[in-house]
Image (cartoon, coloured by chain):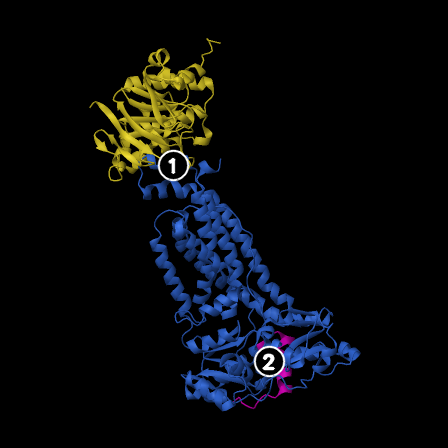
Chain colours: A yellow, B blue
Amino acid sequence: MNALVHFRAVSKVFDNDVAISDITLEIPRGQITALIGPSGCGKSTILRLIVGLITPDTGEIQFDGERIAPGTIMKIRRRLGYVIQDGGLFPHLTARRNLTLQSALFGKNGNDIEKRIGELCVLTKFPSNGLNRYPLELSGGQRQRVSLMRALMLSPELLLLDEPFAALDPLVRVNLQRDLKEICAQLRQTVLVVTHDLPEAAFLADDIVLINEGRIVQRGSIADLRARPTNEFAREFINAQRSLIAL
Amino acid sequence: MKRGCSTKGDFPVADLNKRSCNRGRHRGSLMLLMLLILTVVNASADPIVVGSKKFTESYVLAEIAKRALENAGLKSEHRPGMGGTIILWEALRGGGIDVYPEYTGTIAEEILKQPGASTTQIRNALSAQGIGMTDDLGFNNTYALVMRRDRADQLAIKTISDLQARPELKFGLTHEFLERRDGWRPLSVRYQLAPAQIIGIDHALGYSALAKGQIDVKDAYSTDAKIDDYGLVTLIDDLTFFPQYKAVFLYRKTLSSHAAQALNDLSKSIDEGRMIRLNSEAERTKNYAAAARQFFGTTARASPFVSETLRSKLLRWITRHLELAGISLLLAIAIGLPLGIIASRGGPVGHTILGITGVIQTIPSLALLALLVPLPFFGISARTAIVALFLYGLLPIVRNTASGLQDIAKPLRESAVALGLTAGQRLRKIFLPLASRSILGGIKTSAVINIGTATLAALIGAGGLGEPIISGLNLNDHVTILEGAIPAALLALLVQFLFDLLDRILIPRGLRL
């Protein structure tokens, strides 16, 4: 019962979106778990279900022992941090206002907010003079740092990252991956990260869940996946992601 | 006779896209609005209000009635140039006006729908509706078909029957004449006319077209000063198709007997020749009151009439114009913004809202006014004009608000949800600011449309820059038209400019990068 999130036989069918079928999954506390698989395999759908952007057709999802449902979702959302590929920063607000939006609306004390912003700038290596810039005035990497800060503002119990670095150039991506790993270790943060990039998953997480066509194919460390792929798809997926060195 | 000019005040306006931002606190401004509307509307209580249609003779007769009432010691006021028979009649019944000049043929045909009714029948039918009618004023101003004298002579046309043999002649007829029950259709049947070309044209403009030879035949009124001015000939109504159009005053029976007596004393006092001269005098001097003074002769009390300076007229027109356009715009924002928000959610309700506001836009302005005037709360008042403008102003605001909100990218919407903001917080803090460019664009479009369309207020006597435009159209007097049209155009430009400035204030800087 140590897991923070439980999926129990969850299925979701869409007209024109990614479906998942019969997913049963636990997200343990205090570690990074990576969901990986090809585009359209349903890995983002799992995050969207936790945030309550969509609701399951069958099965149930629990967060910290509480069922995610219309009556509970508003409270649960405030215990989550959510970062998407292009950050989802609001273009009409400065970086600072993006960070303080929630806190101000949820009635947090002004001094506490400032203190928290200071801590996060240090943690995410974001220059504090960039706080008064608008998202369009920031680089892609800086925007993702602000997104990460926004997600961490209220010290969430679960950080959800949906392809957070996919749109960045490789050098920036590598830096951000490294920083993220450090931050999470420091905070002992529970993280669920979605990626289609096996090296990224392997770098960030010890616990990798491979998904295909809406079903879980295999779960384990990168070593397990390489050594004992459970089926042909797993073998192909892992082999497809050759490292440069292997070339 | 009835002159029907069909001048509409709609100025088409390009669809501009910009946006605005709202901040809460709108309840107060709504209250203020209501107050403003009531103030504008209440200014009309005491004096006896004389209405007139928008053609010279009606103006002159109304001025004569006004002076007759004043000579009898009664306070009186003239609301000139209202939009047509239906609007005047409904205004009279509703009490928006107390008196207006009308013609027996129009009363029988158009108002009572009893063609051929006798004077007694007419009087009784009106009486049942609380309306009194004076004896006729002494002249018959019936419809007539007119041609240029040289053209008629050349073709040897003297009677309407002679037109049968000339189907190639071009007819330019007023819209009212084309539609009237005693107008073109029955006339063409009776006389077996089938001209190759008939166009609908404004009454005053039709005279220019006739003079220039762009049309050959037009409808006119037998006491029309322009028949002499343009050297026209009236074709003989050899089958006596046109009914009698004797001028009378219609008045509310609630008027004091003293007032009714003053009006009745005018009967049999104007023959055709005199009416033509009065019309001619009015058109020559551009001053209806002067023509009325001439009617009363030099013996009339020294005239208190001082010609209003152009500057003071312009000030009055512009003030009223801005009042009409401004109040209606504020109303349109107050109602349109919430409707747009609801419409942005789509579904049957959203489609219904967009559908209805769209349909309103297609109603011609004169028709919308004619629909509103009979309603109890409206009548002929600034209030009616404001409501009509408000209705026209809704669509751009509703549509731009809805589309601005719908265009917000899905990741941004979902981020707002994922942050745990409530629906109200998302709308106020995120969605409305993001849609502000589009919303403000809708408001700007509405404002510019309203400045243009507010000229229609003059059709129901509510004033504004439409006043000189309509009377100028009637007089075919370009200077007078421009006195209204130029300020209206400048106002529209000014409004556009101000809203461009407002964009810089209201659109968040982060969206203008």
Question: Residue B291, labelled with which disc?
Answer: 2
> Which three-letter amino acid code belongs to the residue tagged 2?
Ala
Q: Residue placed farthest to the right in the image?
A: B154
The residue sitting at 35% across, 41% down in the picture is B426
Does residue A66 lie above or below B85 as drawn? above
Mark pair 1, 2: CA separation: 79 Å
Q: Determine if the magenta segment contains residue B304.
A: no
Prevalent SS, magenta region: helix
Where's the N terminus of chain B, which quadrant? bottom right
> Which three-letter amino acid code belongs to the residue tagged 1?
Phe
Q: Which element type, helix, strand or loop, lies under badge 1? A: loop
Q: Quadrant of residue A81?
A: top left
Q: Position of residue B281 (x, y in %)?
A: 64, 79
Q: Mark 1 points at which residue?
A: A14
Q: Which element type, helix, strand or loop, lies under badge 2? A: helix
The residue sitting at 38% across, 36% down in the picture is A14
Q: Residue placed farthest to the front in the image?
A: A232
Is any atom of residue B293 visible in this view?
Answer: yes
Co-location on one chain, circles 1 and 2: no
For the record, the magenta segment spans B265-290
Q: In which quarter of the image is residue B6?
A: bottom right
Q: Determine if the magenta segment contains residue B272.
A: yes
Q: Position of residue A170 (x, y in %)?
A: 46, 18
Does residue A204 lie above or below B71 as drawn? above
Label 1: few (<14), some (14–19) or many (≥20) C-alpha neighbours in 10 Å: few
In front of the other: label 1 or label 2?
1
Q: In which quarter of the image is residue B163?
A: bottom right
- Name the subunit of mark 2: B
**Horizontal relation, residue B315 to residue B410: left or right:** right
The residue sitting at 44% across, 57% down in the picture is B356
